[in-house]
Image (cartoon, rainbow, N blue to C red):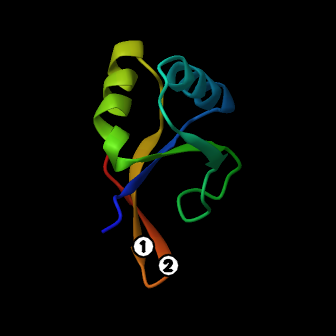
Amino acid sequence: MDENQYIITFNSTHHALAFEKAASDNNMKITILPVPRNIAASCGLAIMFDEVDFENITTLIKDKNLNYAGIYIVKNDKGKKDYIRIG
């Protein structure tokens, strides 16, 4: 069984890049990508990470007081991705 993936969205590119730097400084595995259209039609960057890193990522957000717009779990339903906001 595959583990879940999560996406974090941001209110600005600056916040996304600050998050990417903090994650990199703490040796966390993340992927930076455009915000999926199913979440927001505007341009912007998002961070994707695996479920195994969920606790470390949320701790990083709190410890570094990082700004974000939303946290979503990615659900795959017959080839269609759904994004469910959880935070």
Residue 11 position (above or below residue 17): below
Of residues 67 and 28, the one nearer the viewer is 28
Q: Residue furthest right?
A: 43
Q: On the rendered image, what quadrant is the N terminus found in?
A: bottom left
What residue is rendered at 31% in x and 50% in y?
A: 86
Q: On residue 59, which mark appears? A: none
Of residues 2 and 22, the one nearer the viewer is 2
What is the secondary structure assignment of the residue under circle 1? Answer: strand
Q: On the rendered image, what quadrant is the C terminus found in?
A: top left
What residue is rendered at 60% in x and 59% in y?
A: 36
Is 18 left, or right, of 3 in this rendering?
right
Of residues 54 and 1, the one nearer the viewer is 1
Image coordinates of residue 83 in percent, x first then y, are 43, 62
Location of residue 37 by image quarter: bottom right
Residue 58 position (above or below residue 33): above
Residue 2 position (above or below residue 30): below
Task: Give amino acid for label 2.
Answer: Lys
Residue carrying label 2: 80
Location of residue 21 by image quarter: top right
What is the secondary structure assignment of the residue under circle 2? Answer: strand
Is 47 left, or right, of 17 in this rendering?
left
Q: Circles 2 and 1: CB distance less than 8 Å?
A: yes
What residue is rendered at 50% in x and 81% in y?
A: 79
Q: CA distance from mark 2 to mark 1?
A: 6 Å
Image coordinates of residue 2 in percent, x first then y, are 35, 65
Of residues 16 and 69, the one nearer the viewer is 16
Q: Residues within 10 Å of mark 2 (few under 14, many from 20)?
A: few
Residue carrying label 1: 76
Task: Give amino acid for label 1.
Answer: Asn
